[in-house]
Amino acid sequence: MWPELGEIERMTEDKGLYARAHRAFEERFIPAHRGITFSREKVYAFFNLNRPPKTKNAEGLVVDSFDSTEYKEAIGQLLYKLSDRNKLNKNPLLEQVNRDSYRIVDTELNEIKWWEESTLKALDVTWPYGIDDNSEFGFERDIVIYPGDVIGIAGEGNKGKTTMALNFLLNNLDKFPESIYFTTEFNSTKFRERIKSFDWVNIYNGDGQPRFRLAKHEANFQDVLIPAGMNIVDWVDMPDEPWKIGQIFKKASEKLTTGVCFICLQKRSYKTFAVGGEAAMDYASAFFTISYDKSLVSNVLKVEKVKEPGENNPNYKKFKFGIERGGAKLFAIEEIRE
């Protein structure tokens, strides 16, 4: 690490403490922390500057007398000089986010070469439909989904989110190299019983193994998304920080390459929007809500947002539908014409 002077002295002819700190910071700290907000303490820890000033061996003899004071002062000076707080610095390397937090300024332009032909074409996805009566929403015609798109669906409890999610997963097993279903509520027993109702789909391969994986949903599920696969997240809830849900959609989109991600959210019956508010829709290519309409005595799916309409514009359309077979099959899908 940086305090080992022999290593740094081999890297630069300038033996000054500040110069060594600057060199080590740019060559080792920055590449590991792009896109991350960090504190001064984070820099100290990275360069192992928080170790005790003196340590003793088994015989009680002092074997290390490292003093970090000068090094920490050099770090403080470095962060100030490289940041936008230094008015003399016309091209700051760091932006000071708050009193003791910084981020690395990214000067690399991520240019989109729109004029070059892309190999990414619209995906041929199969949306949930009525298995027995062939009733449908018509989304294959009216919603265009591209590789890397994130789809959101928000609904009240027990109104069909999981049914939609599982139908979307199983209808598209042949269209993606891998598929994964992240769950918050199923354990192995509950899921095994639930999936038995989906008897119109062959969910096993020739070796008797399932054609998709089931995983426990964790807070940072986007870290383990399959970039080229079908990813179902059932469901996301952040009761203490709901404003972060929009960023979850963004991070999922950034992780995907040729795959898609279908994210379920909770929606309270007395709320207009899902948990996370309108921000939950910002990074979604398509977003739906599900509620129960007492006057229709039916579940209702509403198209809240579609970025790329197909033959017809489906935005704000509403559909009533029924669910049978233990929450597996949709039936009697019909557009509500007001």
Image: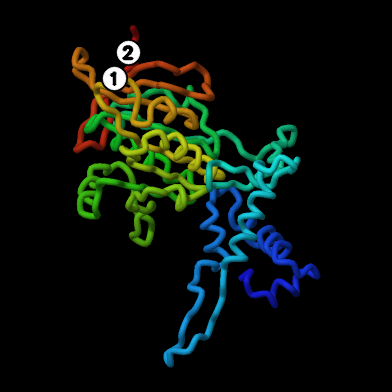
At 30% from the left edge and 25% from the top edge, which residue is drawn?
A: 290
Name the residue carrying label 1.
320
Q: Nearer the viewer, residue 144 or 60?
A: 60
Q: Is residue 128 above or below residue 293?
A: below
Q: Secondary structure at mark 2?
A: loop
Contact between marks 2 and 1 (CB within 8 A): the answer is: yes
According to the picture, the residue beneath numbered tag 2 turns out to be 336
Q: Nearer the viewer, residue 267 or 105?
A: 105
Q: Is residue 332 visible?
A: no
How far apart in space, not on screen, are marks 2 and 1 (Cα)? 7 Å
Which residue reaches farthest right?
13
The correct choice, above or below, for 312 with respect to 328 in the image is above
156 or 337, nearer to the observer: 156
Q: Going by the picture, which residue comes out furthest to the top?
A: 338
Q: Residue at x 42, y 90 (%)?
A: 58
Q: Quadrant of residue 148?
A: top right
- Check the picture and name the quadrant holding the C terminus: top left
Residues 2 and 149: in front is: 2
Q: Position of residue 5 (x, y in %)?
A: 68, 74
Residue 238 at x, y = what percent?
A: 34, 39
Q: Residue at x 21, y 32 (%)?
A: 324
Q: Residue furthest bottom?
A: 59
The percent position of residue 28, horizontal first and vertical second, equals 65, 62
- Residue 161 relative to residue 51: left or right: left
Q: Amino acid at mark 1?
A: Lys
Q: Is residue 296 above or below residue 127?
A: above
Q: Residues within 10 Å of mark 1 (few under 14, many from 20)?
A: many
* Residue type for callout 2: Ile
Q: Considering only vertical position in the picture, is 194 above or below 17? A: above
Is residue 266 visible to us here? yes
Residue 337: % across, % down:
34, 9
